[in-house]
Amino acid sequence: MICVGGLHGNEPMGAVGLQRVVQTLQSRNPTLNGSFFALAGNLTALELGCRFVGKDLNRIWSRENIHSLRSDAVSGNLHSDRKEQYELLSLIEEILGSEFSEIYFVDLHTSSADGGPFAIFGDSLRNRRFGKHLPVTLILGLEEQIHGTLLEWFGELGAVTLGFEAGQHDAPSSAALHEAAVWIALVASGVLPAEECPELAGARTSLSAEAAELPRVVQVLHRHEVQALDDFRMEPGYRNFQAVRKNQLLAKDRNGEIRSPLSGGILLPLYQTQGSDGFFLVQGISRLWLGLSAILRLARLSALVPWLPGVSRHPKLERTVIVNRHVARWLVVQLFHLLGYRKQREEAGRLVFTRRDRG
Ligand SMILES: [Zn+2]
């Protein structure tokens, strides 16, 4: 299990929580079924107390970026956040060079808004099984809206992944909640035997106490993207999961008012100057949908997808199909989610989906 805290430099509580776990483990020296690596993310930004210096270290893990990162490292052309990224990449590759049967990756974050905690992961059955161990709200579909995250990169490598948001950046509870999440994840991954973790029961209690009033599973339906010169200002007082109505005033920018396109809950409203996600809107998912989608995926109905009208296999990418939106009109995205596909991109009336589980 690899765990990163402080990938964003203004979110030091993840690294603090990790440090506490490491210190406890070192003093107790339990027998582990595997290895546990705790890494601090953006060291320069952590020192400066800002999200990043030049580039967001959690938006630059696309295949193309990693490729240019390697060639720029060879030519000595790396500065600030990309230098941090290269150091992190080298460290992770060194870890992955050793022998293992399974990789678990946990990424720890906090937010500028109040409210939480919650967990984020790509909706594969393996990720669901891991994420369900945390007694907090589970968020599906966020990774479809944000590209180039470290979580997504680990997912592409075949790791079981989990992102954890503890709450507000400088809330005193955030470090303790991170610590609790890491204990639970260590046991859930099988790395730390439950009998070697006296913290487990307390960790579950403190997380469920914080998340008691919140929904169990939600999906992200909308992201408001912020550009550098937008002069984006969130209306004051929004908390994670706060209910909003369609057309409710959420924020303002240089073009005027920004109103909610739908009724639902607000997630990660932006109350800091750095960052490109203004806010997200979420809606609850029923247990019926979750159960049904698990059954459909286990029955491998997704294998029939390329034979549906308006659907064709991608000529180059495995597990990927192209959907003609004009033919496959009805509930396209929801249907594909149900079968375990995620949307990659939209181009000229066509949608590209990739299946998450690798069989
Ligand atoms: Zn973050």
Image (spheres, grey):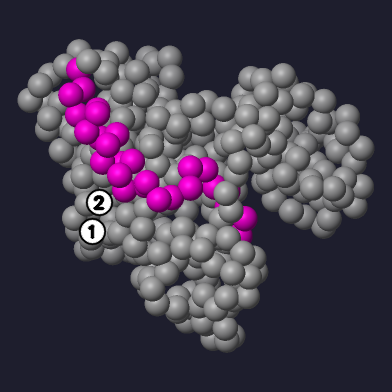
Look at the image and give the residue range highlighted in magenta. 196-222
Mark 1 within 8 Å of ligand 1, using the beta carbon: no
Amino acid of disc 2: Ser
In magenta segment, residue 199: yes
Amino acid of disc 1: Ala
Number of dots carrying numbers = 2
Q: Position of residue 129 (x, y in %)?
A: 49, 26
Q: Is residue 218 left or right of residue 297?
A: left
Residue that appears at 47% across and 53% down: 59
Residue 45: give its label: none
Q: Position of residue 331 (x, y in %)?
A: 79, 47
Q: Position of residue 237 (x, y in %)?
A: 38, 73
> Helix or strand or loop: what does disc 1 sit on?
loop
- Farthest-out residue, left: 27
Q: Is residue 245 left or right of residue 347?
A: left
Residue that appears at 88% across and 29% down: 307
Picture quarter with the N terminus = top left
Residue that appears at 58% across and 60% down: 264
Q: Which residue is mark 1?
A: 171
In magenta segment, residue 74: no
Residue that appears at 62% across and 24% down: 358
CA distance for labels 2 and 1: 6 Å
> Helix or strand or loop: what does disc 2 sit on?
helix
Residue contact between numbered discs 2 and 1, judged by CB atoms under 8 Å? yes
Picture quarter with the C terminus = top right
Indicate the quadrant where residue 112 lies. Answer: bottom left
Residue 174: give its label: 2
